[in-house]
Amino acid sequence: MFELPLFPLNTVLFPGAPIHLHIFEPRYQKMIGLCIEESRPFGVVLIRSGKEANAPLATPHRIGCTANIIQVQRMEQGRFNIVAIGQERFRILTLDTDSQPYLIGQVELYPFQIKDPQELEQRAARLRRQFQKFVAAVIEVSGNSVEIGDLPEDALGLAYMAATVLQIGVHQKQALLEQSDVVTLLDQLLYIYRREQALLKAMIHHGEKQDGIPYSLN
């Protein structure tokens, strides 16, 4: 268990994914300033209730992702532009809403327990093939090249990348982040990608073209 400053946002961060933030509220200027000074992470958590900015502290979901700051641009009036990278899932045990103007959580890391590595790799291979089919369909529909980069070799890295790329509702993404079993996570991602590819095939059949990456509305 350890103490972690928390940043409630209307987004879900996965390990390995970048997040770009403009820090303008005094409470988060203080929090991010301390994280920069002490080279420590902060926690990104999806808002369960409340507002992201200029409002009382929001109530977060209990599962989030630590973020390490890798780039800082200092601006006037104490503002920052930062880039951070998601690192590890965590679970909030208790919340401190009084010590600082921002939330502080007593948290523990929430790693996946891998029971059957062979089964995991089989699921990952299916998701990798489906992901590649999906990208090919995106290119056909949009008429544009899509830069995804090399897919991670490890199953968990692949799952996190696949979850990050999906443009689905934040509560669906939060459900993926909270999944306790990595095999089930891979199965859920495979189902979503098959659904999205079916949408793309329908668009191809009807001769529709779109700029960028089309997704179903969730």
Image (tube, rainbow, N blue to C red):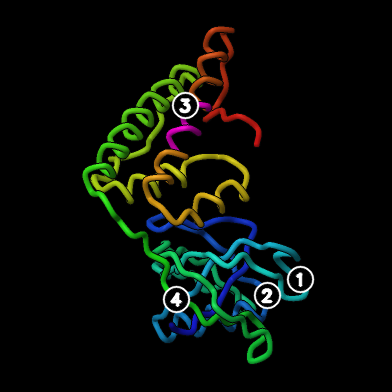
Which amino acid does the dot numbered 4 rest on? Glu
Q: CA distance from mark 4 to mark 2?
A: 27 Å
Residue at (43% x, 22% y) in the render: 139
Q: Which mark is residue 54?
A: 1
The residue under label 4 is 108
Mark 2 or mark 3: which comes first in sequence?
2
Residue at (63% x, 63% y) in the render: 9
* Residue 84 found in image quarter: bottom left
Is 102 situated left or right of 72 in this image?
Answer: right
The residue under label 3 is 194
Q: Mark 3, residues whose alpha carbon is within 10 Å: few (<14), some, or many (≥20)?
A: some
Mark 4 or mark 2: which comes first in sequence?
2
Secondary structure category for the residue under label 4 = strand
Secondary structure category for the residue under label 2 = loop
Which sits in the foreground, 46 or 125? 125
Mark 1 or mark 4: which comes first in sequence?
1
Q: Determine whether label 1 and label 4 are within 8 Å by CB.
A: no
The residue under label 2 is 25
Which sits in the foreground, 73 or 84? 84
Number of the front mark, 4 or 2: 4
What percent of the width, then of the height, locates residue 124? 30, 39
Mark 1 or mark 3: which comes first in sequence?
1
Residue at (38% x, 35% y) in the render: 147
Q: Give the magenta-colored segment's residue range.
A: 189-195
Is 150 situated left or right of 131 in this image?
Answer: left
What percent of the width, then of the height, locates residue 46? 61, 61
* Residue 108 found in image quarter: bottom left
Which sits in the foreground, 121 or 49? 121
Q: Mark 1, residues whose alpha carbon is within 10 Å: few (<14), some, or many (≥20)?
A: few
What percent of the width, then of the height, locates residue 119? 26, 42
Is 130 situated left or right of 92 in this image?
Answer: left
